[in-house]
Amino acid sequence: MLLQSRLSFTFLSFKALYSYNSLKLFIFFRFLDPFIHYLFFAMITTSIVGSEYLTYVILGNIAFYTGRELFQNFISIFRYERRFGTLSLNVAAPLPTFVILIKKSVVPLLDSLFIFIISVLMAYVMFDVSFSWQSFWLLCGAGVIMVFALFGAALLIAGISLLFSNVNLFVNLLFAGFQLLCGVNFPVSLLPDFLQNISNILPLTHSVELIRDIQAGQNERIYHLALAELSIGAVYFIIAILLIGLMEKYAKQTGRLFDNE
Amino acid sequence: MNILSLIIKEFIYFTNLNNRIYQFILFVQPLVLLTIIHFMSVMKGIEITGPYIIATAIVSMWSYVLYSSGSSLIWQKWNDSLNLLIAAPVSLFQIVLSKMLSNSLIAFISLTLTLFYAKIIFSLNIGIAHLGTFIFTAIVLLVSLSVVGMFLAVVFTTVQEVYSFQNFILTPVILLSGIFIPVESLPFTFRIISYLLPMTWAVESIYSGLNETNDVFLLAGVSLGSSFIYLFILFFGIRRMEKIMKQSGSLGVV
């Protein structure tokens, strides 16, 4: 009964807030959209640097796309809560806001993992990215690590996004930054030193390397990379908890969520 | 006079710095794409050449035209002003045409910005031998982009999730129009679709101009010719759509 109640909370949140809750949209945005994203970068790569870099770029973009969708989903959830006026109800509810958010996070996290696995299979079938079955399971493990590492950052970014009345520019700039700084299409080592320092503290950078190492069968660094990514994710998670706590405290003290409300 | 006034108003709206989504498409997106291409070439140890810079600029132009023109009518519908446009004494075709022309002007700014970024930020050699030919072929491309934009503006009035579905059009058109990969290397069926797009001929014309081959004006002519055929079809299509809307007293097909 308790389990059913907890699951129904997650399910109802999914139906109310999740962007792609019809089958048609799900197929469009979970199969066609990632394929088109990879196709675009495959086209640029083949044209400019040749097909020998295809695997490198496709794997980087799998990590980027998965991360981008995770962030996007969290931002959408917060945005819808704000638009429909239920964000303040979450804050006023007897359950801590953070627990509510964790419950609502189940679907986006599973969805991101699904995107990652589908993308890996798509890369194998459509873009000739080869790997063994053993590597596939390792890749799935890397996907789990990546999604959990990005979870904290996604919560943090979704929280920050509430400060913007028009979130589109913030979101687009953020994703552009991740694409350029996390080694998605080219190695981080090509960037100037100060940008490399930023890259190393961003979630995703180590996941991109981890995925590439697993696919290439180079297992020497994988535990180090996985640990580094999880550590970075944990730091973002703690910052997200603190930020949400602060926002909740501010909301309860002032009786409003934002200065402009 | 009405068209000119509409073009100016549309131009001011879309270049307004408060319009945040278009700020990104216009100013940031070309820079991001150019940065990716620059570092990819560094990774390979090659120097990025003129056609790739132009290809980046074309992608930026196409993105802008797609996102602005494609959503122009549905945006009016969302703001409940489409019925006012239908009731206006000016024909809907003229209104849509003015929107496309202003978007094309801004797309030309996007092209200039990309070349500016390439030259100033990345110190790349763009390799335009004949500036006059390049500007002419770029204008031919803008005409073809405008016509495709007009077509999409009409088609997208029937789609709810316009902004999301635009992504599904962006890449296939880039692929089919030979911006990065030559059309000759595509499978036969795709090649047929490619050559039905006026953009394909315009892109080939630009690249021919850069390579200083003789068929620049022939290709530009084919592109202009096919653009005007589509424009002709659109004229009757939009007129018919407008007539149905006025007869039925509702927004009819949209």
Image (tube, rainbow, N blue to C red):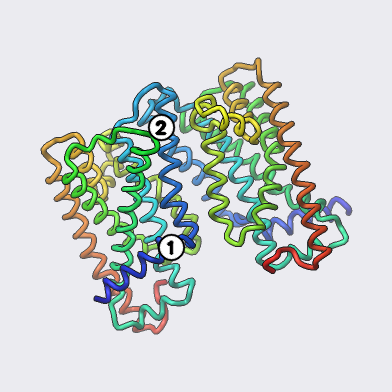
What's the residue type where badge 1 is placed? Asn
Tell if the residue under mark 2 belongs to the same chain as the one under mark 1. Answer: yes
Determine the chain carrying the residue at label 1: B
Q: Which mark is residue B38?
A: 2
Distance between mark 2 and mark 1 Cα atoms: 29 Å
The residue under the point 47% across, 38% down is: A38
Asked which quadrant contains residue A40, the reply is top left
Asked which quadrant contains residue A97, the reply is bottom right
Q: Is B59 left or right of A19, judged from the image as shown?
A: left
Q: Which mark is residue B172?
A: none
Nearer to us of marks 2 and 1 is: 1
| Whole-percent x, y for residue A41 in the image | 44, 36
Nearer to the camera, A134 or B44: B44
Nearer to the camera, B117 or B214: B117
Nearer to the camera, A38 or B22: B22
Residue B154 visible in image: no
Q: Is residue B171 above or below residue B97?
A: above
The residue under the point 33% across, 53% down is: B109
| Whole-percent x, y for residue A234 in the image | 76, 36
Q: Is B211 left or right of A198, judged from the image as shown?
A: left
Circle 2 packing at 10 Å, graded few (<14), some (14-19), many (20+), is many
Q: Secondary structure at mark 2?
A: helix
* Image quarter hosting the N terminus of chain A: bottom right
The residue under the point 57% across, 50% down is: A171
Mark 1, residue position:
B16
Residue B210 visible in image: yes
Nearer to the camera, B218 or A166: A166
